[in-house]
Amino acid sequence: MPYLIDGHNLIAALPDIRLDDPDDEAQLVIKLKGFVARKRTKCVVIFDGGLPGGASPMSSRSVTVIFASAQHSNADALLKRRMGKIRDVSGWTVVSSDREVANYARDRRLRQLTSQQFAQDLQRREGPSEAVDEDEKPLPSPADTDEFMNLFGAEEADE
């Protein structure tokens, strides 16, 4: 289930990132990359006040980062525009505590979480000092290893 996230609204709900920190957006993107890797999903996060606005180089395959142009738009308008283009509304979750954005999401029958609800989920699932390399391949589970060994007739090594 992909997420559409009101970035600065979510930062305000997190206890370990401050809106007045010059790197607040980058810190949130790092957290979101870990979250979507664990959930095996994707997200779009939209922030206010970008110069010149548009897609950010902080984006990855699973986290799209967009800044609303400071002169021509704001995050709420971009969020609503994106919601209006979603065809499969059953698959998306909108994360914002902004009443207008939340009401628009509900009117479009999109699942909606407040930033505080999502922040709790984000914090609960996060480990200490977590850094995610999206190109790193996860190790197989012991069950996967056993199945591989059985399928390919490999014998256990002598000890």
Image (cartoon, rainbow, N blue to C red):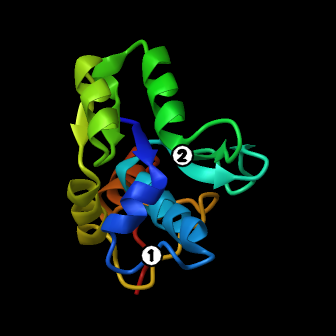
Give the left or right position of residue 68, taking residue 2 as reference. right
Task: Determine the residue positioned at 51% across, 47% down.
Answer: 45
Task: Determine the residue positioned at 34% across, 35% down.
Answer: 101
Q: Secondary structure at mark 2?
A: strand
Picture layout, residue 64 above or below residue 131: above
- Circle 1 residues within 10 Å: few <14, some 14–19, many ≥20: few
Where does the N terminus fall, quadrant-wise?
A: top left
In the image shown, does 133 or 151 lie closer to the viewer? 133
Q: Position of residue 68 (x, y in %)?
A: 63, 43
Q: Of tags 2 and 1, which is closer to the observer? A: 2
In the image shown, does 12 or 41 lie closer to the viewer? 12
The image quadrant of residue 126 is bottom left
Residue contact at pointers 2 and 1, CB within 8 angstroms: no
Task: Determine the residue positioned at 42% across, 12% down.
Answer: 87
Task: Determine the residue positioned at 75% across, 53% down.
Answer: 57
Q: Secondary structure at mark 1?
A: loop
Does the image show residue 138?
no
Amino acid marked by disc 2: Ile
Give the left or right position of residue 4, taking residue 136 as reference. left
Give the left or right position of residue 117, taking residue 59 as reference. left
Does the image show residue 133?
yes
| Disc ID at residue 105 | none
The image quadrant of residue 80 is top left
Q: Position of residue 110 (x, y in %)?
A: 28, 25
Real-space CA distance between mark 2 and mark 1, rounded to the nearest whole angstrom: 52 Å
- Residue occupying the far front of the picture: 71
| Disc ID at residue 46 | 2
Name the residue that disc number 1 marks: 157
Q: Position of residue 107 (x, y in %)?
A: 25, 19
- Picture mark count: 2
